[in-house]
Structure formats: C-alpha cells, structure tokens
Amino acid sequence: MPNWSLHQRPLIKSAMTPFPYSIAIEAPLEHAIEMMSAHDIRHLPVKDGSKLVGIVTDRDVRMVLDTRLAPRWERDLQVRDACIPDAYVVDLNTPLDTVLSEMVENNVSSALVLKDGKLAGIFTTYDACRAFGEFLSWLFPEGGDEAA
C-alpha cells in the first residue's frame, strides 16, 4: 500500500506489482496463455535471454489467435507472434501521475518498471484502480458518503 501524503508525489514503485512473471520470446504462445491463466494475470513482460524486449497481453494473444484459421494449438505460434516490442517502460522513481497520464495519452494498459535497467515491476490498469481505491480510503477514512 502506498504511503500517501498530500505534500509528496507518489512514485510508480509505490503502486506497481513487484517482481512480475515474465516469458521468453521464443516460448510457445500456449505457455503464455497457461501462465496468464494459472496466475490470473493479463500482462507478461517478454525477454530475449536476460534482455527485456516487449510485453504480451491476453488481448494481443486473442487477436493473434482470432486471425488464424487452424485450431489453436496446431498453429505452432510463439510469444514473438503476439509480442508488442515497443512497450511503455519507466524508471522505478517516475512519479505515479506521470505514468498514469502517459498511459492514458498513449492508450496503453501497462508500464514495465525498471531499476538500473532491469525489470523490477509492472504497473497495469488493475494496479491503478487498486492504488486509487487505497488513496480514496486514505483520503476519506470513514468510508462514508456524505452526499447520500
């Protein structure tokens, strides 16, 4: 939970999901589907060896599968076939509001968070909603609705 303050801008590291799962670019696409399902996630950072090369989302996977005519597992598809290579990447100390604004402006659902050039976390629209809910609970600790 972020340590909220009205006097200091929160950083992305306070709201991200740390140490996200990742997948190799040459992995079968079915492995990405299985990982997302097993861990109840919709985004996977993609690596080529130790280098971060993009992201794959459940939406990207569905789009690739929907454009093919063969049965799903007979397509011999790899993560590279659904990977978005120009993922939105930010530093661990980027202000949260900057990341949120960029995500909206560029219509992206996630940001890969780096520390010293290495993957440290992921921030998704789910994380944004969770952080906003926590912020509102902090701002209005009674939880009541004065207008109702």
Image: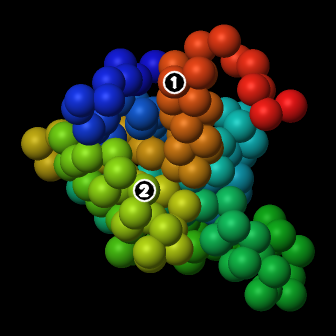
Quarter holding the C terminus is top right
Q: Tell whether 55 sits left or right of 117.
A: right
Q: Residue at horizontal 24%, vertical 29%?
A: 7
Q: Residue at horizontal 42%, vertical 33%?
A: 15
Earlier in the chain: of badge 2 and badge 1, it is: 2
Q: Which mark is residue 139?
A: 1
Q: Which mark is residue 99?
A: none
Q: Secondary structure at mark 1?
A: helix
Q: What's the amino acid at mark 2?
A: Leu
Q: Tell whether 141 sits left or right of 105.
A: right
Q: Residue at horizontal 34%, vertical 45%?
A: 96
For this rendering, which residue is in front, 135 or 90?
A: 135
Q: Secondary structure at mark 2?
A: helix
Q: Quadrant of residue 120?
A: top left
> Do the residues under discs 2 and 1 have CB atoms within 8 angstroms?
no
Counting from the top left corner in percent of width and height, residue 1 is at: 46, 19
Q: What's the amino acid at mark 1?
A: Leu
Q: Is residue 65 above or below residue 112?
A: below
Q: Which mark is residue 100?
A: 2
For this rendering, which residue is in front, 28 or 96?
A: 96
Q: Residues within 10 Å of mark 1 (few under 14, many from 20)?
A: few
For this rendering, which residue is in front, 10 or 18?
A: 10
Counting from the top left corner in percent of width and height, residue 105 is at: 44, 75
Counting from the top left corner in percent of width and height, residue 48 is at: 32, 59
Counting from the top left corner in percent of width and height, residue 34 is at: 71, 45
Of all residues, the one furthest to the left in this rendering is: 116
